[in-house]
Amino acid sequence: MANSWFQFKQFLVKQESAAMKVCTDSCVFGATVPVDSEVRSILDIGTGTGLLALMLAQRTTDCVRIDAVEMNEDAALQALDNFFNSPWDSRIKLHACSIQDYFKFTPKQYDLIICNPPFFSSSLKTGNTSKDMALHQSHLLIEELMQVISFMLKGNGDAYLLISIYEEANFMKAANAVGLSVNRFQAMYDNEGKLIRYVLHIRKDSNHIKNTEDKFIIRNADNEYTTQFVNALKYFYLNL
């Protein structure tokens, strides 16, 4: 059973009410997603516990504002508590609604959009409503997510998505359908032989999208954290 909290160096994530707990791949995503020095506004779609918003707040200056959207009531309350008790409460705003509703009533565009979207479109559900909302696309279709990104991303902005390796083709297709340029930014491995996630980079044009992907390996053959992982997470994990 997962702990009810996760202590980072500069903040605490309480997670007893959230269906999806703090996990290593999300931490890697939060630590390595590129944040340009010109970024002033960030949108975190489906913030859950608020982990990614907090990590991005730690990595950015006081002039950066973060909007975190979460439709699940329990998770939203948990994220709100985590934000309030962090050093960056004044910079992170929680919106307790679906991204579809937020999009309808928010005529705002962002320099950076991040999202760890539902993993699976067709696999079996668990029967746990909150967890199924977090894991499955029944409440947020890929096509809807891409439409939101298309309208809420600034012309020179960047969006990054942490996705299942089995859904890449679907995300690529949906992005191209609304005129977005997309490429794989990172391939994330639990170890040298176990690919677990992809990070996609999305822009409204193809400028500044790399043609080659980064390879990120979490553990080595001895099941110890790699130097790559330590360098990325040493500002967040207590024991690194």
Image (cartoon, rainbow, N blue to C red):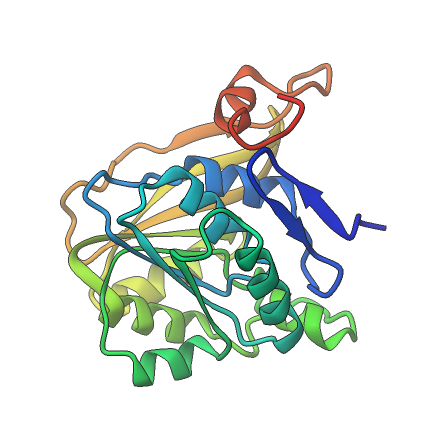
Query: Can you say whether 119 is above or below 191 in the image?
Result: below
Answer with the quarter of the image where residue 144 lies: bottom left
x, y percent for residue 116? 50, 56
Q: Is residue 162 left or right of residue 49?
A: left
The residue lying toward the viewer, choosing from 91 and 23, is 91
Q: Is residue 230 left or right of residue 201?
A: right
Identify which residue is drawn at 69% across, 73% down.
130
Query: Can you say whether 211 is above or below 235 in the image?
Result: below
x, y percent for residue 21? 69, 54
Q: Is residue 151 left or right of residue 87?
A: left
x, y percent for residue 233? 53, 29
Answer with the quarter of the image where residue 195 lies: top right
Q: Residue furthest right?
A: 1
Identify which residue is drawn at 26% across, 68% down.
152
Specify whether residue 175 is in view: yes
The residue lying toward the viewer, choosing from 137 and 63, is 63
Identify which residue is drawn at 26% across, 63% down.
176
Q: Is residue 240 left or right of residue 201?
A: right
Query: Can you say whether 85 is above or below 130 in the image?
Result: above
x, y percent for residue 94? 47, 68
Identify which residue is drawn at 43% across, 35% down.
32
Q: How many marks?
A: 0
